Every structure is written in structure tokens, then in C-alpha cells.
Image (spheres, coloured by chain):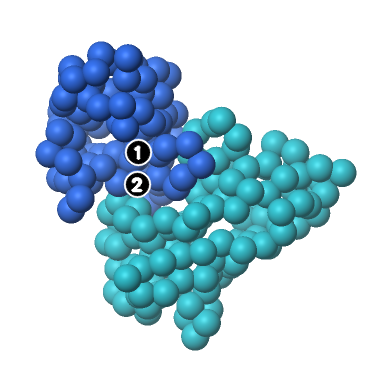
Amino acid sequence: QITLKESGPTLVKPTQTLTLTCTFSGFSLTTTGVGVAWIRQPPAKALEWLALIYWDDDKRYSPSLRSRLTVTKDTSENQVVLTVTNMDPVDTATYYCAYCASNSQFDYWGQGTLVTVSS
Amino acid sequence: SYELTQPLSVSVDLGQTARITCGGNNLGNKVVHWYQQKPGQAPVVVIYRDSNRPSGIPERFSGSNSGNTATLTISRAQAGDEADYYCQVWDSSTVVFGGGTKLTVL
């Protein structure tokens, strides 16, 4: 059974750096083809893909946010970490991590974590 | 960058057929996935690779993709189908989501 869960601060101040952790079970991020993505959703708005890290440590980023995003993995801890620099109120959103295999659909999602950016 | 266009809202009478479209340049040459998202919940795959249903998704859900448009069809719509629906593709190793469609069952 594959599960993912996001954790991190619920409130950050403008200009601060956000660090979120996705802790997963039921699969290994060393298995060929496997990836973990970060996707966010501002309140009452659409899904927005942020980043993805693959089993071989290849990383992909949203072109519009690339300069602010870093994604890393710790395979021994079954965790993927996303950092977002220079947070702004428009970055207020529910942040999800999700599992995919072989560049296909996102079969499993975490419950999401709401991050509010406010002074 | 690649863009996917969805109608903001679609309404369907209870028991009738709803069709939600997703438009993109030569979309038929890409593989489309569809997600259903209910309030306060994470998205769930309802159609993958254009027309495949995951286990547990009713046969009432079907998908097609041709030309510049992919379509999610929900037959015999039920009240429980009310949700937001998103299409998604891969483009040049990045992920693109459509803007989402709110389905209302009347």
C-alpha cells in the first residue's frame, strides 16, 4: 500500500524560505521509473505542478518557478524535500506530493498541507 | 510552454451524460490523464492514458483524445460525481494541468 504525507510549517512570512517534507511508504525511490512530484493548489484555484524528482536523481521544475525551487530526496529515510525561496502571499496554497511511475499519471497523492504566507 | 484549456463549469441533469473537454495544440499526440477532486480532498485519477479506468472507478467514466481535444465523459451522472475535474499531460518532461472544470449535477 502506497502512502504519502506532507509535513512542514503552516505559516511562513514573506521573503522566508519554505521547506516541506514528503514522507512516503509502500515504494522505493530507487526503483527504476519512479518519481515523486510536488503540486500545489491556491485556495479555490487550479492545480499547479512545481517539481519532480526521479529514482535516478534527475529533477524537473516548473519553468515559471524554477529559480525558486529545489527538490531533493533521502532514499534511506523515504523522504522528498521541497524548498521554495522568497515566499510571497500568492504562494499561499495547499501543497501536495504525489507518486508517479514511468512519466504517467499521479496514482497516489498525499493529503496535502496548507501553507499560508503572511506577516 | 504548453497550455491546456478547460471550461470553467459544466452542468448536467441527474442521470444524463456530462462531457468535459480539455483542449491543447495537437493534444491527440499526447497522453491525457483525468483527475476528480472533491472539496477538501486530494485529486483522484479517474482516467489514465486517454481512456483507461483505474480499478474502482465506475464504468460510467470514459475518455477519448483526438485532434486538439480530449474529452472526459460521465454517463448516467450522479450527485456524487459533483467535483472539479482536471486534465493533465506531460510536455517536454514537465507536467501540465488544465485549469479545471467544476461539474454540477442538477
**Colour given to chain B in the rendered image:** blue
**Colour given to chain A in the rendered image:** cyan
Number of disc labels? 2
Residue under the image location 51 percent in, 64 percent down: A5
- Amino acid at circle 1: Gln
- Amino acid at circle 2: Val
Mark 2 vs mark 1: which is more N-terminal? Answer: 1
- In the picture as drawn, the residue positioned furthest to the left comes out as B59
Residue under the image location 87 percent in, 44 percent down: A119
Residue A37 % position (x, y): 46, 57
Which label number is shown at residue A39? Answer: none
**Residue count near mark 2 (Cα–Cα under 10 Å), binned few <14, some 14–19, many ≥20:** some
- Relative placement, left or right, of A15 versus B7 is right
Secondary element type, mark 2:
strand
Residue A16 % position (x, y): 80, 54
The quarter in which the C terminus of chain B is drawn is top left
Looking at the picture, does residue A26 appear above or below residue B17? below
- Relative placement, left or right, of A20 versus A2 is right
Residue B19 % position (x, y): 23, 21
Residue under the image location 40 percent in, 24 percent down: B102
Q: Mark 1 points at which residue?
A: B36
The quarter in which the N terminus of chain B is drawn is top left
Chain ID, mark 1:
B
Q: Which of A79 and A43 is in front in this view?
A: A43
Q: Are marks 2 and 1 on the same chain?
A: yes
Q: Answer whether labels 2 and 1 touch (C-beta < 8 Å).
A: yes
